[in-house]
Image: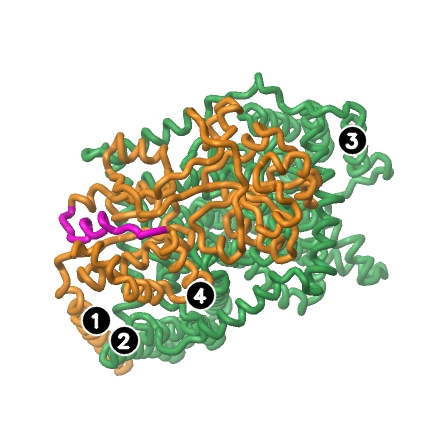
Chain colours: A orange, B green
Amino acid sequence: MRGKWLYGAVGVVAALAAVAGLIVASTATARPTAAKASCGTVTLNEQAWTGSTANTYVAKYVLEKYLGCKVKVTDIAEIPVYQAMAQGKVSAVLEDWQHVAQYKQYATKQKTVTLEGSNGLTGHIGWFIPKYLLQKYPSFATWKGIKGHEKVFASPEAPQGMFLGGDPSYEQKDTQLIQALGLKLKHVTVGAETAEVARYSQLIAQRKPVIFYWWTPEYRNAELNLTEVKLPARMKGCEDDGTTNAPIAKYRCAYSSYPLEKVFSTKFVKSGSPAVAVLKRWAWPSNADQNLVSSWIAGQHMDPQKAAEKYVKSHMAVVNKWLGK
Amino acid sequence: MAASSIAARPGIVLEHRPWWRSRMTIVAAIVGAMVICHLTLSRTLSWPDSLVWHSLTHYLDNIQNWLAAESAKTDPNFAYRLIHWISSGLDALVRWLYHLLSSWLTWPGTTLLGGLLAWRFGGRRAAVIMVGSFASFAALGLWDDSMQTLALMLVAVALSLLVGVPLGIVAGRSDRFNGLITPVLDAMQIVPAFAYLMPVVIFFSVGPAAAVITTMVYSVPPAVRITALGIRSVPANTVEAALALGSTKRQLLWKVQLPLARRLLLLSVNQTILFALSMVVIAGLINTEGGLGAPVTNGLNSDPALAILAGVAIVVMAIALDRVTEAIAERTDTAKRHLDVAGRKRARLATGAVFLSIAVAAILGHLLSAGSAYTRWTAQDWLRTQVQNALDYVQKPTTFLFKDITNPVGNFLVAHMLQPLDTFLVETPWFITLAGLAAIAFVLSGLRPATTTILMFALIGAIGEWQDAMDTFSQVLVATAIAVAIGIVLGVLAAEIPWVSRAIRPVNDVLQTLPQLVYVIPFVYIFPISYVPGLIASVLYAFPVVVRLVERGVRDVAPETVEAAGAFGATRLQTLVKVKIPLARDAIMLGINQGIIMVLAVVVIAGLVGSGALGYAVAAGLQRGQFGIGVVASIAILAMGIALDRVTRGNRSAAKGGRS
């Protein structure tokens, strides 16, 4: 019988200790958040490319340092994040590459997200080649010069000449464009952005010919010394989205350039947080600014928080404009 | 995949036929005929456009938009309110568990909790593994992300077992229910998560709940299948004896079937954990709470070394959870436990002491402000540099590895295996492909599977995916062939040689849980040909399952049969080749069959690293917001999976009839 008392005593002590632990825990965690209640929590979504990381962390640093906001960073995929913004679980996306169908569904119809204009960058998609190719084939500066020389881009999977396609998540029409231009290139889908980078950087490292779907702004372009192939000029009714099944002639033009959009959750806009006004003013002065921060993060593997701090400290004029000073 | 008859029973007389009438010869003849047709017709005849239902994607898009609009209404209907209630409950549960592990217990308390619980219920080895895994999270500098993922996975695994085991018990006892649920399970495993992420988000919003649901879709099927297999594997005469002694149905289940199915129930826990952890990255795409998936997705672009470290943390967690649950199950085995009164007292005292010391550690943690996440000293920077160096080596096209090994091998694979097969399947007139596949299904499995095969491939044509499907099909065939070959060899070796079995198990665990996107990226550099990295990813993901099933099958051959062979003077090799392998044929066939399912489960990832076709379409469907396109491509993958499953199922249904 004595044994049972012992277990009982141990149990009671354990329970008391646990309760004490919880009390200590709750007092320890409750304190720091109380002071900065005016801004509240802002949730920014980081997308899976380095430029987006740069946006998110620079904005985060500014909101936390100058407004006392609590900024949470999420990593939700590009399309589901619209639903998340509609429900107010994500406050803002700072760089959206023209998801027109989603604009229609969520901004126009449901009015659960709002389009807040450019983040200061101009996005442009195109066909890129490494500059060293122009030394041997100067005609490759335009698409016409490639015609008849497609075999230069031969690869194991495309002996007739390979066109390296882009990440499936990005807007593209290269299959149609190749057909419309009458080129004999084979469109090879290499997959995710990382895989595409791996493939072309491997070829560039060997100084081999390669032509691929790529875009600006992107911090790697300067480092790899890329140049864009000139495509036919834009015309009226020009199509950029290969999935719309438009007549093939409609695709016979270069990709458009467009501002990269900021998208906010309507619930966030109506929340009255001082962060709304700052994020509305937030925009990069130029593509070069984002490339700079991206190269610190991805090129030098700097911690994104530290990269943001470094940018903010060296660009106070820009930051003051965001803050409305 | 009627996961019914894994253990070959002695007494099945293998059919004896002359070689020219054997199934393999007939199949070869059919393939030969198809090749001749392909060569003589020399004209591409893809599925006719007039037989394609083009507006399907449009309808699917409309459905999704309607669902999204409904969920945005301020006054949602009952179904949405119910789902909302479930999702907030799950959100709260995961968040609470995370707070328990981080801010309440603090990191010393959590480590001690894990270590002591494992020690108390699983023994010393389990404790060492548990503490070792926590130490790795700390050393990798990923403590907080690991705790997020741990909380999520504990909930997902527990719920998967809670749902899966009862369903498995029912499926094990009722053939009709088993027949009903098997195609559902197939669909859950084959349909790529990318296709249903968006609907999940519409219903469950983003956050832990959506991540749990997405994970469960993939981790419930193994729980159901293996539990059912366990119940079925209880010998029929034991069941009869119990019934003859007057057991009720309930007594039969609790006193006979479940205890005897213990080992397989354990395997189901193990597989549920591994399957759940293989979903960390994808579930991370719709979770708001971070976790180990985020550094993988983001790191791939900006910091691949960090992505690899996060992948390692996922694997460590999977192996630790698996080994500890196994140890606990072994220790609590009622057949092995004979505690006297004093022993029980000691055990209870130990339990009390465990909780006491955890509480003390938690309080100390708070008093010394150790913090909720361990961040003091980590080896992360050092490890990242090492990994980055390795990656830099891999990326250099001038190394011996690249120039003399991987590049030529990759080129050979593409030029002599993938490319010809792809051309053959894409260019052969569709009706010849269809007829050939149906004939093969008929020879291997019978009339019904042949009909199913025709219907499934016709469906692929009708939804407009014929060309992409043939492209994917050729890659799936090559990947399956390689995976099955590796799997059978390793499986047989593991069954025969104990150290091979021991050595291969952690390898299997790693390959099943390391996010494919993590290990496939180095292959993109060293095999820079679009199909090859995807092919490697598929093979690496598929062969562990084949190994596991083949090993079990060969091992489970009745010992008396093996002894009898020995008594007749057969050498070890003869016993293996003439007795064990033929008798394990069912298990090997199941292995091939599961291998195909696993290869199909990687189609999307393969599509993301260059395999294109259906996988690419599914990924594009999610990421460009074209729900319809993604779903249609997923249906094609599923149809292909069902057809291949029926073709390789063999005559197992006939064998099943004799037993039940």
Q: What range of the chain is rendered magenta?
A: A271-286
Identify the residue shown where x is 75% and y is 58%: B562
Kindly indicate whether the residue at mark 2 contacts the one at mark 3 (C-beta within 8 angstroms): no
| Circle 4 residues within 10 Å: few <14, some 14–19, many ≥20 | some
| Circle 3 residues within 10 Å: few <14, some 14–19, many ≥20 | some
Q: In this view, does B471 lie above or below B158?
A: above
Residue type marked 3: Val
Q: SS at mark 2?
A: helix
Kindly indicate whether the residue at mark 1 contacts the one at mark 2 (C-beta within 8 angstroms): yes
Distance Cα–Cα, label 4 vs label 2 = 35 Å
Residue tagged 3:
B35
Q: Total of numbered circles in the picture?
A: 4
Residue tagged 2:
B362
| Circle 1 residues within 10 Å: few <14, some 14–19, many ≥20 | many
Would residue A71 appear left or right of A251 to someone viewing this image? left
Residue tagged 4:
A301
Residue type marked 4: His
Kindly indicate whether the residue at mark 2 contacts the one at mark 4 (C-beta within 8 angstroms): no
Q: SS at mark 3?
A: helix
